[in-house]
Amino acid sequence: METVNIHEAKTHLSRLLERVTRGDSVIAGKADRAPGSDRAGRTRTPAAHGLHGRPASRTSRFRSHGRVEDRGAVRRATVKLLLDTHILLCAAAEPDRLPAAARTLIEDQANQLLFSATSLWEVAIKSALGREDFAVHAAMLRRGFTDNGYAELPITGAHAVAVASLPPIHRDPSDRLLVAQAIAEGVILLTADELVGQYPGPIRRG
């Protein structure tokens, strides 16, 4: 006499019926299950548990065994930094003259760096006027930034009309347009200009 469990009886019903017709005794019933097995007798794999005994998520984003610096990099959102004209020129030609705070932000690989068409316009105008502090070709400056992973921010109509809502803190039209772009796009304007730093909005003094 042989005892088989219900699952086995359902799975091999035709074979068991042939044995019964041959005179064999077969009993279908509940068989003892090994600890950790399911009703079919299959071994269950214990679920992985994470922090505080909760089941671990399928995502590997916050692996408890990951390095602290890896988890911090995932949690931190990318910061978009729009560099003003002065910061851009220093970064391109004289990085040693950058303020320490600005240099740290620029060298942080987690930050996305942007330059504005406003700055290229300002450089082109002042370079043509013979300004020694703008003695650089705007086209070469643009290519240098794009080749080094900077993203270009064009000037839109929305940026232009946003200038009208700015308080009269700075008289320079290019700086006012940079502030308007930062506000309209929701990016941080990195500047070393004390007056620009007085504007409300996403402005950061470097």
Image: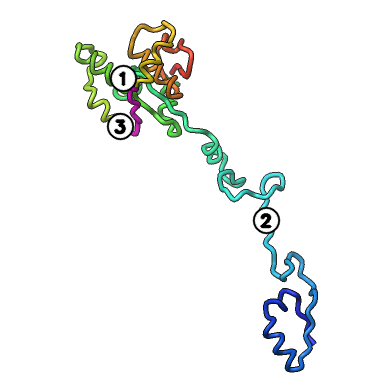
How many residues crowd mark 1 within 10 Å: few (<14), some (14–19), many (20+)? many
Q: Does residue 147 belong to the magenta stretch?
A: yes
Amino acid under label 3? Thr
- Label 1, label 2: how far apart the Cα atoms are: 57 Å
Q: How many marks?
A: 3
Q: Is residue 43 above or below residue 150?
A: below
| Secondary structure type for disc 2 | loop
Quarter of the image holding residue 109? Answer: top left
Q: Which residue is mark 1?
A: 119
The residue positioned 74% from the left and 68% from the top of the image is 39
Position of the N terminus by quadrant: bottom right
Amino acid under label 2? Ala
Amino acid under label 1? Ser
Q: Nearer the viewer, residue 137 or 90?
A: 137
The segment highlighted magenta reads 146-156
For marks 2 and 3, the one nearer the N-term is 2
Position of the C terminus by quadrant: top left
Counting from the top left corner in percent of width and height, residue 64 is at: 62, 45
For marks 1 and 2, the one nearer the N-term is 2
Quarter of the image holding residue 119? Answer: top left
How many residues crowd mark 2 within 10 Å: few (<14), some (14–19), many (20+)? few
The residue positioned 51% from the left and 33% from the top of the image is 77
| Secondary structure type for disc 3 | helix
How many residues crowd mark 3 within 10 Å: few (<14), some (14–19), many (20+)? few
Q: Is residue 77 above or below residue 206?
A: below
Identify the disc placed on residue 146: 3
| Secondary structure type for disc 1 | helix
Q: Which residue is mark 2?
A: 47
Determine contact: label 1, label 2, CB under 8 Å: no
Counting from the top left corner in percent of width and height, residue 152 is at: 33, 28
For marks 1 and 3, the one nearer the N-term is 1
Q: Is residue 129 left or right of residue 55?
A: left
